[in-house]
Image: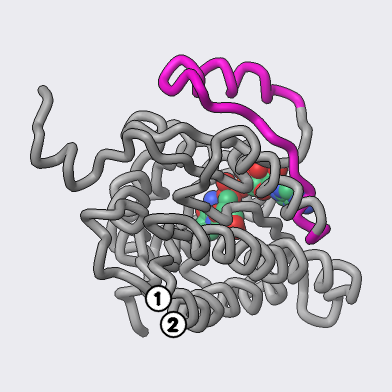
């Protein structure tokens, strides 16, 4: 049922969104959610199998949407994604920084190359996205909105994922800092911190023991479904509904971060 009030609050008609990491489990759900709210979506990520099917589904909802590849380990690749987006659509209203990698091991086994790779993808690339897209948004009429994907481990360090935890704490910190810088330029910057949503990057870590531990510390006693993040994504990105929200890290975690022992 059409509802003019909700359309005005959350509708993204005529706006262009770039989702870096849009080929992943959560990023894929973000792409579809944004398209259903009316946005034209640039699904971006590494070239990998299954992109054509994902793009077909996305274009069935928002036909002008497209896939553009990016390798977030390279600043020039993110810059090229921005330039291609501007060339194709003329502007970019929203960016979601959702690329991320993870790995688990004992602390004394952490290798420098893994630490550096995780930090580069999870934190340095988020900075590059904010800086490059934030500048372009600041130079266009109407500004824009950026959403960085943090984690419950931005707040609570998680065992065995040391670089991941530290990088996600950095994402929440960077989000606040960049939000302050870009606010005068009509660009809002927020973070979404999901709890536990089985996906490609974390499935190998979710052995039965860790699963029991997570669920026993989650008041809702279950994992999340990617679609359960969409409401918060729309709130934080929407020009109208989220108009006074910046620098926030919003937790969608079944209550995980509400628990203190
Ligand atoms: N799934 C969860 O429970 C959970 C919880 C908290 C935060 N997160 C975060 O959500 C985001 C999405 O993760 P997901 O769970 O959907 O994982 P996923 O593995 O399904 O998706 C990760 C995405 O990152 C992209 N990516 C990785 N390296 C890249 C590179 N070098 N260049 C470009 N793209 C690259 C992949 O192509 C993929 O699209 C990540 O930042 C992750 O840390 C996930």
* Above or below, comparing residue 202 to residue 164 in the picture: above
Please state, as top left, top right, bottom left or bottom right, where the N terminus lies in the image.
top left
Percent x, y of residue 92: 51, 47
Percent x, y of residue 229: 37, 48
Query: Which quadrant of the figure has residue 186?
Result: bottom left
Percent x, y of residue 44: 65, 40
Q: How many marks?
A: 2
Say which element carries label 2. Answer: helix
Instruction: Inspect this view and state whether residue 164 appears.
Output: yes
109 left or right, relative to 251: right
Nearest to the observer: residue 189 or residue 90: 90
9 left or right, relative to 237: left
Residue at 63% x, 36% y is 23
Q: CA distance from mark 2 to mark 1?
A: 6 Å
Say which element carries label 1. Answer: helix
Give neighbour class at mark 2: few <14, some 14-19, many 20+ (Cα, 10 Å).
some
The answer to whether marks 2 and 1 mark residues whose Cβ atoms lie closer than 8 Å is: yes
The stretch of residues the image draws in magenta is 49-75
The residue singled out by tag 1 in the image is: 183
The residue singled out by tag 2 in the image is: 180
Q: Which mark is residue 241?
A: none
Residue at 9% x, 32% y is 3
């Amino acid at each position: 049922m059409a509802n003019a009030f909700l359309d005005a609050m959350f509708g993204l008609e005529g706006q262009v969104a770039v989702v870096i990491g849009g080929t992943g489990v959560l990023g894929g759900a973000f792409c579809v959610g944004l398209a259903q709210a009316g946005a034209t979506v640039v699904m971006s990520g590494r070239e990998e199998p299954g992109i054509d099917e994902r793009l077909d589904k996305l274009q069935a909802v928002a036909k002008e949407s497209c896939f553009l590849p990016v390798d977030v380990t390279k600043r020039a690749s993110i810059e090229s994604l921005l330039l291609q987006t501007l060339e194709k659509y003329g502007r970019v209203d929203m960016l979601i920084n959702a690329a991320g990698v993870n790995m688990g091991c004992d602390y004394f086994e952490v290798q420098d190359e893994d630490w550096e790779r995780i930090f580069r993808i999870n934190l340095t690339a988020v900075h590059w996205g904010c800086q490059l897209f934030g500048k372009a948004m600041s130079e266009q009429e109407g500004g824009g909105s950026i959403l960085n994907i943090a984690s419950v481990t931005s707040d609570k360090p998680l065992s065995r994922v040391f670089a991941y935890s530290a990088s996600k704490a950095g994402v929440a910190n960077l989000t606040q800092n960049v939000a302050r810088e870009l606010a005068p330029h009509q660009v809002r910057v927020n973070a979404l911190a999901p709890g536990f949503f089985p996906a490609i990057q974390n499935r190998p870590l979710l052995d039965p023991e860790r699963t029991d531990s997570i669920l026993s510390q989650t008041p809702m006693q279950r994992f999340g479904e990617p679609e359960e993040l969409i409401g918060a994504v729309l709130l934080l990105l929407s020009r109208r509904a989220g108009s006074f929200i910046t620098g926030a890290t919003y937790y969608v975690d079944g209550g995980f971060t509400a628990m203190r022992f």
